Amino acid sequence: MLKIEGLSVNYGSLRALTNVDLEVQDQGILHGVIGPNGAGKSTLLDAVCGRRRPTAGSVRYRGEDITGRSVAWRRRHGMSRSFQRTSIFPDLSVREQLVLIAQHLGDDRLDDIIRLMDLGAYLDQKAGRIAYGVQRRVDVALALIGRPSILLMDEPGAGLSAVETLRLFEHLRELVSEQKIVAVVVEHDVEAVFACCGMITVLDLGCHLATGVPSEVRKDSRVIAAYLGSAA
Amino acid sequence: MTESASSSWRVPATGAAGVMLFGFGGLLPAYLASDFTLKVANEGLLLGMLALSVAFLMSEAGLVALGVASVYGSAGYLFAIGMSEWGLTPTIAVVFAFFALIAYSGVLGALIVRTNPLAFMMLTLAAGEMVSHAVMLEAVHDYTGGADGLVVNFKGAILGVQAADFVNPRYFWPIGWTAVWLIGVTLWGVARSRLGATLRAVRQNEERMRFSGFNTYLPRVIAYVLVNAVAAVAGLLHVLNTGFVSPESLGLGVSTNALVAALMGGTAGSIGPLAGGLIFAFAQDEFGARGATQLLTGVAIVLFIVVFPRGVVGGVVAVLRRIAPGLVWLRGKA
């Protein structure tokens, strides 16, 4: 489904990602991406979704090289993205923004998304005036519209408590399983990732360190040395 | 009373009130007001049209255009040149001027709407200033009349209206009133359409719109062309009414007046900018007689940005909402 080959991204003289290879094709499970600060996790998502043009390498989606494609093209072809900082429309009601995007993408199962993300009670409220945790759910709901086949999520738990993050991840796991989506999640909360993700990739200093099921990754000596330490 | 029950009479009641306001507003002033008052009111209507165009772009797309006068004034020049130099009939000259300005706006809009709001504002200012200075060039003096401008005389009718009727303030008022209503209702409809919703969403969060598969460029180009079409109509009505066009009508002063009128009346909705245009025209007449037009502009900008940011109409609606919160039809924009 998604194949990243030799991906490098530079910010001026700083190498944020160096020659990263990654293949993600398991539908219905969360694929977590973890690593210390500055590991290149968000840069990886930015390069995959077209927000940042890679310095080298390619992104292949369903076998097609989409490295030069626009963000809007990728979205229309099933690649969706949520952001570390909540990215919604604060002056539109929750309903207005969901309907606007659903109409554009021709998605008629908005009721299912509203039910899945538990947004029924907030539909007529301006998105900028609802609690932050609910705003995060609106953000994910916007990303889910249009039946995406790949969902890229950058720290969906940012700003939430550990309990809220775990609850959100359980919600996401259920959703991804139900919709058979390929989901890549960058997250700092290691416990939530190990509890809910079926596959995990670890980055360190812009390089790919390991990919595997949680039990393998937790035992990987390189991952323990670079990131997990005593948490393993 | 439930909301659904109240909404059952809200639409016909609002429609009936609108039709009555349109009818009385179009006819009564011509009987009740003096020629001089009507002349100032006509200027206010045309300024209100320009303010409508500026306000629409501000409230829907979050963009401030400072070059609206270049389209407003150019409409008059193109109409005059079309008739005098190329022998076009008045109706054909109006159509030519309108579509030439649509084409100009399309090209300019395609170049500048990609920029950030500040750069957009400066680029519209630059484009407007270039046009206002271009008509003064010696090379085009024979066409534009240079600093003296052009007197525009024509005989016959345009769209069934005789030339003399445009010049008579008593006859021009219902023409201008009808035009401003048509424009106001059109912009109101566009604001409530999918294009309007897209523009507001792009204004709030362009990146999310791109990540939702939207083309965020084309809607802004369309909005820019639309507001310039309104400015072109206002400019054509202005030249038909006054029979004269000069470099002053292209200048920054007219653009600034339109912006101030929009701020005075309130930028949300169609009524505010129109009211702002009328208020500004009468205030300008009063202050201008004392040589204090610039003082009026300065005071109005400070007052309506700092103290009354929703403008006169927005402020009145807010007060009415507080006094009578049950008036549910006031929920929408003013």
Image (spheres, rainbow, N blue to C red):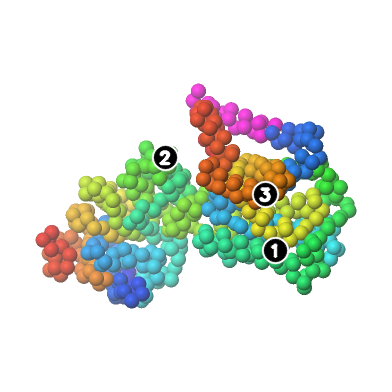
Residue position for label 1: B132
| Residue A217 place in picture, x, y as percent | 17, 64
Q: Residue furthest top?
A: B1
> Do the dots labelled 2 and 1 sit on one chain?
no
* Chain on which label 1 sits: B
Residue position for label 3: B293
The residue tagged with tag 3: helix, strand or loop? helix
In the picture, the disc for residue A125 is: 2
From the image, give the main secondary structure of the stretch colored magenta.
helix
Q: Residue furthest right?
A: B155
Image: B165 above or below B213: above
Question: Which span is picked out in magenta?
Answer: B1-20
As for residue A55 lying within the magenta part, the answer is no
Q: Residue at x 40, y 66 (%)?
A: A50
Rendering quarter of residue B86: bottom right
Q: CA distance from mark 3 to mark 2?
A: 44 Å
